Image (tube, rainbow, N blue to C red):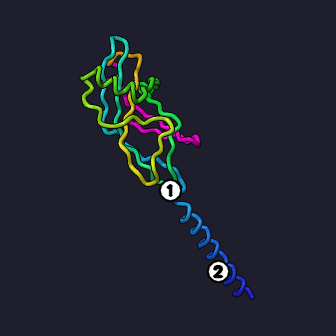
Amino acid sequence: MSNRFLAAFGIGIVCIAVAVAGVLYMQRGAHLELPAKVLKVRTAPLDENSSVVVIDFRAGNSSDYPFVVRSVDVLMEDNAGTRYHGATAAETDAKRLFEGLPILGEKFNDTLIIKEKIAPHATVDRMVAARFEAPEAKLQGRKQFIVRVEEIDGKVFEISEK
């Protein structure tokens, strides 16, 4: 009787393990992720006390559901670890920025905007521009820039420069 019990118990454990593995396999695309990398960072002075940064990046949606953007923020982290928030620019302002500051070069990508949807299993190239109340030398001496993208359900993803 002891052998029968052990055999039934072992079969029960295997069945539970198979069921758990099946559930995890079925849910593999339900987890929102935003793998991304920074492609290019450009800075330019606006005046002696403020500067602008333009960050081009590539982001992908590896889930089975669309990724809907709630907000986009740009942070600058200095060498001491202090983070400074930049004022992000809208798409129309970014177009004017490139027209007014030829030092920035060409505008390669569209701006990542609020309520934009990244389709399931898609990869997009986007940019974000932000103004910082700091001279350009401070932006050049930074540790890194960070693009914070918040998804509509509240999950926050950080795309760091380095």
Residue 142 shown in magenta: yes
| Vertical comparison of 153 with 89: above or below | below
Amino acid beneath label 2: Ile
**Identity of the residue drawn at 39% across and 24% down:** 93
Amino acid beneath label 1: Asp
Q: Residue furthest right?
A: 1
Can you give x and y, in whole percent of width and height, for residue 60 in the image?
A: 41, 48
**Identity of the residue drawn at 33% across and 16% down:** 46
Q: Quadrant of the N terminus?
A: bottom right
Per the rendering, the mark at residue 11 is: 2
**Identity of the residue drawn at 56% across and 61% down:** 27
73 sits left or right of 109 in the view: right
Callout 1 secondary element? loop
- The residue segment tinted magenta is 137-161
Residue under label 1, please give it.
64
Can you give x and y, in whole percent of width and height, for residue 108 in the image?
A: 29, 36
Whether residue 79 appears in this view of the structure is no
Can you give x and y, in whole percent of width and height, for residue 90 in the image?
A: 43, 28
Q: Quadrant of the C terminus?
A: top left
Q: Residue furthest front?
A: 92
Can you give x and y, in whole percent of width and height, for residue 159 in the image?
A: 42, 39
| Vertical comparison of 132 with 56: above or below | above
**Identity of the residue drawn at 35% across and 22% down:** 52
Residue 141 shown in magenta: yes
| Vertical comparison of 53 with 63: above or below | above
Q: CA distance from mark 2 to mark 1?
A: 34 Å
